[in-house]
Every structure is written in structure tokens, then in C-alpha cells.
Amino acid sequence: MRRRRSRGGQTGEISAKLTTPALRATPPLRGGECILLLLLLLLPACGKEGPPLPPFIRIPEPVKDLKAVQNGYTLILTWTNPAKNIDGSAATNLAHVQIRNDGAILAMLNVSAPGQLQSHSIPLGLSLGGLRTYTAVVDTTQGKTSQVSNVATIEPVEVPGRVLGLRAVVDQRRIRLEWDRPQEHLELADAFVIARTDVPSESQTVSETRFEDNQYQPGKVLTYQVTAVRRMPGNPVLGVGPESVTVTVEDKTAPAVPAGLDIVQSDMGGYLTWNPNQETDLAGYHVFRSESANAQFRSLSDRIITTNAFLDSSYRSGLYYRVSAVDEFGNESAMSAPLRAP
């Protein structure tokens, strides 16, 4: 058979293949058959699985801020419970905190709350010497345990005893605290820490056995705590205590009795003077007069005299005078000794 070139430059043999009876007999796909074919092609892709997700590792993070301090003859351990697990998830199933001393379990405590501060007290007993080492381990309700915490070390020392005779007086716009030094280990009492229970974070340290507080509201009931302190390199160590006293903020202390009363006669009457009182809450004075030293004394003014001087225009020789002091809270001193006018 001769080869005949087609118009497109291809041979007649190729044209013959395209017009074979087998190809001409294949019917075209209908619309529904096309859709079915597409679904069959897409079905394996829809059921394909992605990469596996890593499982949650619910192991608590370790405690990182374990501390040990001495308070009297007790050691106080403090730490913050972990808030998260090592995989970053919330630590919602914490169960216990194991307190360990040199690796051995000393106490097993229930966790108060994740992310919260917790503490544990350890009595020292009679043995104080030697360095002590503590760690903490946290576990979960599923039995998973954290890594060991940081190491807290402390060497207990002897401390001063409890302060004695703590007392509080409200006077002259302030609360004055006074106390006596402890009898036990007096030589170790280098200073004193004063705390008010309504603001414990604002404690004060003094070296004397007295303290004054003027930051308060009248009418409140306040409790003060005083503890002797031994100064040590680094942090001071609290002694035995604290000793407490409760006081109602109400000034019931009268001013001192005025002193130095004197009388000078003038054309206008008798001019009385006396030494000024030194109270910061002083309001003034009352001046009294009587016919005799043993008779009743009557006030010469309905109002408080704000200066330490007074003119009695009804003055005459032989009269008797006395003076009292009054503070802002209405507390009045006793009257001064009678003074006879010349």
C-alpha cells in the first residue's frame, strides 16, 4: 500500500489508525457517568489521614523557688506549686507535694492549688547544729511525678527569746508601743520587728524597745506583734514570738497638769501665766477661781483658753486660782495646785 501524506504532513498510516472500527464503536460518556467517575477519583483523597498528633505529657513542672527560713525554733519552707505541666498544659490534677530532707521523704502534703504559694513548718527541737538540705517533688492523681525542685539549704542558729511587757498607749495623735528585752538569750536581741496584723507586709525594724505609729483610723481595733531579731549575714533571724497586744484607737490619755502658775497684778486686773504644755494634741486650758483653797473652784471661761495666759478683770487679793489642760479628744488633766493671789 502506498503511503499518502496528509495535509498536515502526517502519513496516511496514522490517519488510518484514527479511523479504526474499534475507536469508532466507543460511545461517549453521559453526564451522570462523568460525575460518578469524578467521585470515585476524589474518594481516596477525602479519606486520607493526616500526621499523628503528639499525646499530652501530663507531668508537672518542677518547683523552682523552694526557700527555707528560720522563725524562732521552727523552720518554714515556702514554694510555689507548678501551674503547668512540662507540655504546656494546665496542671489541673496535682495531688501531693513531697518534702524531702537529704533525699528522704520528710512529709507528704496535699497540694493547696496550682500556681499558689504554699508552706510547711518543721520544728527544730533541741538540735540546732548542722546544715540542712531540703527539696520538693510534686505528683498527680495519675501518679506522675515532677523532677526534683531546687535545693534549699539552711543552718539553724540560737535565737533571742520572747519580748516582755508589751504595752500600747494611744496619745497625742499616735499609738506608742513599749516593751522590755527578752530574758532568754538577751545578748542575741540585736533589733526588733514590729508588724500590724492588718498590714503585715509593712513591718518595721527598730533597735530600741519602743515604737510609734501615727498611720491609723480613729475607732479601729489594731493588733501589733513584736519579735526580737538576731542579725545574721544575709538575712536576720526572728526570735521566739511574736508577742501581741491589741488596742482600740481611742485617746483616753489626759494632758499633763500645767505647771508654773503665776499672777501679776495690773490696772486691768490680775494677769495669770503658766508654762505651756508640750502635748501635740493640746486644745487649751481652763482657769478656775475660788474664795478659799478648800472651797469649790469655778471656771472663769465657758470656752477653752488657747494660750497660756489669762486676764481676770475681777481680780482681788486673797483669791485662789488653779489651771487644767484639755486635749483634742476632751481629756482633761487634774487642776494645778491652788495659788493665792497677792
Image (spheres, rainbow, N blue to C red):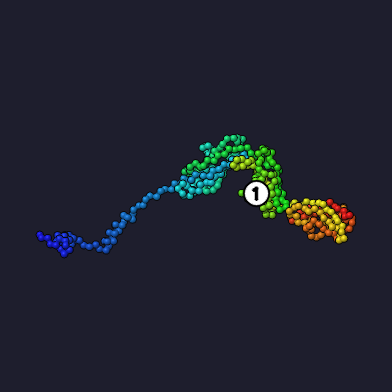
Could you tell whether 160 is left or right of 112 in the image?
A: right
* Position of residue 107 measured from the top left corner of the image (x, y, whole percent): 54, 40
Question: Which quadrant is home to the C terminus?
Answer: bottom right
Q: Which residue is mark 1?
A: 196
Could you tell whether 311 is left or right of 101 in the image?
A: right
Q: Residue visible at 15% across and 63% down?
A: 6
Q: Quadrant of residue 10?
A: bottom left
Question: Which quadrant is home to the N terminus?
Answer: bottom left
- Report crowding for label 1: few under 14, some 14 to 19, many 20 or more residues within 10 A (C-alpha): some
Residue placed furthest toward the bottom: 7
Q: Quadrant of residue 313?
A: bottom right
Q: Is residue 20 visible?
A: no
Q: 339 or 118: which is nearer to us?
A: 339
Q: Is residue 323 above or below residue 95?
A: below
* Position of residue 140 measured from the top left corner of the image (x, y, whole percent): 49, 45
Q: Is residue 68 above or below residue 267?
A: above
Could you tell whether 149 is left or right of 338 in the image?
A: left
Q: Amino acid at mark 1?
A: Arg
* Position of residue 36 measured from the top left corner of the image (x, y, whole percent): 28, 60
Q: Is residue 281 visible?
A: yes
Q: Quadrant of residue 159?
A: top right
Q: Residue visible at 82% across and 58% down?
A: 310
Q: Is residue 67 above or below residue 339?
A: above
Q: Residue visible at 16% across and 60% down?
A: 14
Per the image, label 1 sits on a secondary structure element best described as strand
* Position of residue 189 measured from the top left corner of the image (x, y, whole percent): 66, 40
